[in-house]
Image (spheres, coloured by chain):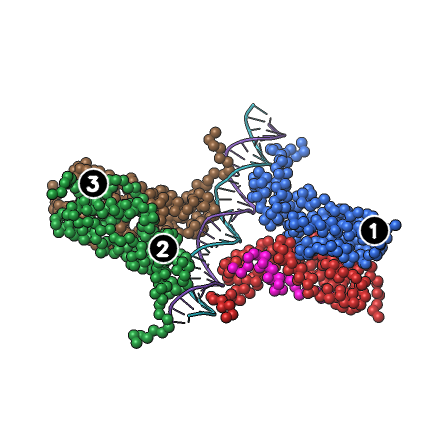
Chain colours: A green, B brown, C red, D blue, E cyan, F purple
Amino acid sequence: MMGGRRGAPRSEAARIAILEATASRFAEHGYEHLTIEGIAAQAGVGKQTIYRWWKTKTALVAECLLEGMLLPGSFIPPDTGDLGRDLTGWVEGVLRFIDDPDSAELMHSLLAAAATDEQIGRMLRDALAGDSALSTRLESAAATGDLAPGTPLRELGDALVGGLVLRVICRTPTDMGSAARFVGALLGPQPHRSGKP
Amino acid sequence: MMGGRRGAPRSEAARIAILEATASRFAEHGYEHLTIEGIAAQAGVGKQTIYRWWKTKTALVAECLLEGMLLPGSFIPPDTGDLGRDLTGWVEGVLRFIDDPDSAELMHSLLAAAATDEQIGRMLRDALAGDSALSTRLESAAATGDLAPGTPLRELGDALVGGLVLRVICRTPTDMGSAARFVGALLGPQPHRSGKP
Amino acid sequence: MMGGRRGAPRSEAARIAILEATASRFAEHGYEHLTIEGIAAQAGVGKQTIYRWWKTKTALVAECLLEGMLLPGSFIPPDTGDLGRDLTGWVEGVLRFIDDPDSAELMHSLLAAAATDEQIGRMLRDALAGDSALSTRLESAAATGDLAPGTPLRELGDALVGGLVLRVICRTPTDMGSAARFVGALLGPQPHRSGKP
Amino acid sequence: MMGGRRGAPRSEAARIAILEATASRFAEHGYEHLTIEGIAAQAGVGKQTIYRWWKTKTALVAECLLEGMLLPGSFIPPDTGDLGRDLTGWVEGVLRFIDDPDSAELMHSLLAAAATDEQIGRMLRDALAGDSALSTRLESAAATGDLAPGTPLRELGDALVGGLVLRVICRTPTDMGSAARFVGALLGPQPHRSGKP
DNA sequence: GACTAAGCGAGACGGTACGTCGCGTCTTTAC
DNA sequence: GTAAAGACGCGACGTACCGTCTCGCTTAGTC
């Protein structure tokens, strides 16, 4: 039934081997040195099996992205009620991640891929901002009044993420105060709360 | 004295022809379809002359960047005394530039090149932020009190530029209010000044 | 069973096109101006297809030689019963061939290739002496007593061929009596038979 | 007077350094891997100095040949009165020389050069046969009646030399009896002289 | 003694071909 | 009918030499 396809069904094992090989080589050699032949060899697969199911190298990377094989689990900002402190902590976490050379290399490849290819660009947008925990935290801040009513949350999130992306692309060096200054630039001067009642 | 170099000196004509060919093909075909053979052919030059003076393809692009052959003249924000309005105008100009498909393609290539190569990344940073008129406008705002004292200007500039870069990479669509919302997210809600005293 | 090779088998069409292009360009441009790129282009073939099956340019030429695409059909000495006259006729034929500029050029290339490359050298030996009709004629002469018993036929053949090869290499000019003198030098003075019984 | 050339005269030191470098690299790398750049570098000379005085690579090699920098001192056949024995000894000496791999390599290069280039070919002819001691020995044999009157000496010499050249080109292996068989093939059966009074 | 050629080492230049890598397609055998 | 294997035409890579052309320096005559 169901349209009666004949012959062997698509091999799930091959599909997974290909995606894993892609992710592994992407992380290791970067986007622009990613080769189909290399992936096929590492996956123990014929090249045709790749070309049969993915039209472009890009589509392959995009599917890895969708499967979450490229990005680390998203950074979740805490919600202590103090927006500035929470965001600063979040930014610190991201900067710490970025400071690791391997992670940085991965991000460079990913951003290069996104800049090169429209599909990956859109997908990265979804992965970064779409369902992220960051927007949740900003919405919560808007609800409690930590953010002035009418503040465009999406744009604020873009500025946060974009500023960090720019640091990655431009290799801006990080120092101890970077996170606090960055958040301060966006939220305005944060009151120094010496303690917490 | 003077180190006495012997042999014919480097040909400035060849250098310029190569850089121009590089810039032209970069804009036309993008970073990842840039070929040394194509550049050499268009410049009317032997490949070896390129390899002799530039170690990598990215070094070539970087020098184009330095010579200002890739980026348009920087966008200069006006200084009417109203920071929000000035920045909104500036962002609108940038978004208008980005919306042009050719410019967008150029920016995608440039960002891919910067993400791929450290040298280009740093150079892009200098080109974007270093001497930019944007930082001048922000300093002026800090002086007049439009920005709260202590606001980290560099980080604010990074957030502005980064947010725009993120839009480019992620192909975020632009609507009429984008610029105003974006600036509003960064500076806080801007008073609606119906006129001007 | 049967060793089961997988993948597409070697293309016989490509092999033949390559060999024909090689032979054609060898005859036209000579051994030292033979280029793989030229052969590939003329054969309508990728360079890699040549490099996959032949390790060196000389192996390619050697295979042409084996296939008989370079040497003319061997010169067959007649067998009239008069060894001196038969050999003289044979030498005259060879000298006439050598005197043609195109043939001479071909022989020069072939000898240069043989001198350069061991494999071609051995192959040329086989092509020249191995199955040649010359040795047959000498054996026949030995059987009829035209050659003294015990004459080393192989060495005699080498001297005949070698003398001619030397003329080719050294561009020795030919005159009317060359053939007769040459054969006379090897067989001893030949009786002048004024008629034919 | 005398046409009064002005400027520095040709540097003999450079000329000699170039010829020596040529001979050295010719012997080491063979004719077809001989490069002008390599010669210039080894001679400590600018390329232009080579191109100024020699039109072709060939002319360079030819001059080396003329200066006797490539060929070993000629082999001189003894004159004991026994032509067969003398020639056999001479052939044995030549075969011994040829059997040494370095000498063989040199001869291969030289023959390749001669086959490739007309000028070198003619020059090789002169060097091999022209003034050689071999022709002297043959003339002596003709005078004493060891060779039948009317035997074409030049052709006989060509057959001797050509047979050896053919062995070099074709890499014919040598055994103990080669020399005797070869001479026997050319001179006819040699009487076995058990002793000599 | 200053001037003027030419020779010279060095090396940049526009080219041609090299031998290799990876592309995306096609063709075969095995399951 | 999918899959592994791998040959194929193709385009670009980065390298080696080609033969030509400046350079700055040295080395003789000639004025």
Spot the residue most to the bottom.
A1
Amino acid identity at mark 1: Asp
| Residue C156 at x, y percent in the picture | 75, 59
Tags 3 and 1 touching, CB below 8 Å:
no
Front disc: 3 or 1:
1
Residue B153's image quarter?
Answer: top left
Badge 2 sits on which subunit? Answer: A
Residue topped by disc 3: B79
Question: Is C71 within the magenta?
Answer: yes
Residue topped by disc 1: D82
| Residue B57 at x, y percent in the picture | 40, 48
| Residue range (magenta) | C52-77
Front disc: 1 or 2:
2
Question: Is B170 within the magenta?
Answer: no
Q: Residues within 10 Å of mark 2 (few under 14, many from 20)?
A: some
How many marks the image carries: the answer is: 3
